[in-house]
Each structure stands twice: as C-alpha cells, then as structure tokens.
Amino acid sequence: MSAIFNFQSLLTVILLLICTCAYIRALAPSVLDKNKSGILGIFWKCARIGERKSPWVACCCVMMAFSILFVQ
C-alpha cells in the first residue's frame, strides 16, 4: 500500500523527511540555506522544524518506532 493512503506510513515518511533534512543541514548548511523559497524550500522548512522542535520530533520518532516494532 502506498504511503499516501496509509496514515501511519505517511507520518513515518514525514518524520523521516524532517530528521533527514535536519541532519543534512547540520552537516552542510549551505545546501539547504540557498533554497529558502520555492519547491525546494520545503526541505529548508523541514530542517527548521527538526532543529527547533527537536525534543518533540525525537519523541515522535520513538513512539513511531515502538508502534512499528511492537504494535504491527
């Protein structure tokens, strides 16, 4: 089933996108900072969410991992 039609898969993809963008921005900030607007600005916004809300994102990642490992 596609991640678009399954809500839990969609949340997993969004969390992975946020975590990946924040990690890339930590390693090479110039890659995401030059694209703050347009369609590639989504990645910059995801990186900002990952940086500013990192305790909440980490908590969501732990809950999602627990859900995938033990509930399904």
Image (spheres, rainbow, N blue to C red):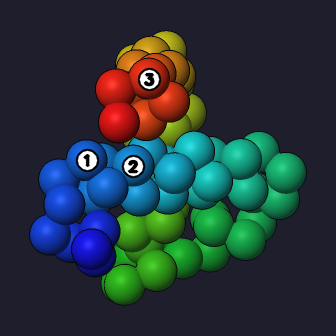
Frontmost residue, 35 versus 43: 43
Name of the residue lying farthest toward the bottom:
39
Residue designated by label 3: 70
32 shown above or below 39: above
Q: For mark 2, does the 10 Å Cα neighbourhood hold few (<14), some (14 to 19), or many (20 or more) residues?
A: some
The answer to whether 35 appears left or right of 25 in the picture is left
Q: In front: 29, or 46?
A: 46
Q: Earlier in the sequence, mark 3 or mark 1?
A: 1
Q: Mark 3, mark 1: which one is toward the viewer?
A: 3
Q: Earlier in the sequence, mark 2 or mark 3?
A: 2
- Mark 1–mark 2 contact, CB under 8 Å? yes
Total marks placed: 3
Residue 16, position in %: x, y?
Answer: 52, 51
Q: Can residue 14 be seen in this view?
A: no
| Amino acid type, residue under disc 2 in the picture | Thr
Distance from disc 1 to disc 2, alpha carbons, whole Å, reads: 6 Å
The amino acid type, in three-letter code, at marker 3 is Phe
Q: Which marked residue is nearer to the observer: mark 2 or mark 3?
A: 3
| Residue drawn at x 60%, y 56% as measured from the top left | 21
**On the picture, is 55 further left or further right than 72?**
right
Image vertical order of residue 23 relative to residue 64, above or below: below
The one nearer the camera, 57 or 61, is 61
Horizontal side of residue 67 vs 36, given as left or right: left
Label 2's element? Answer: helix
Who is closer to the viewer here, 49 or 5? 5
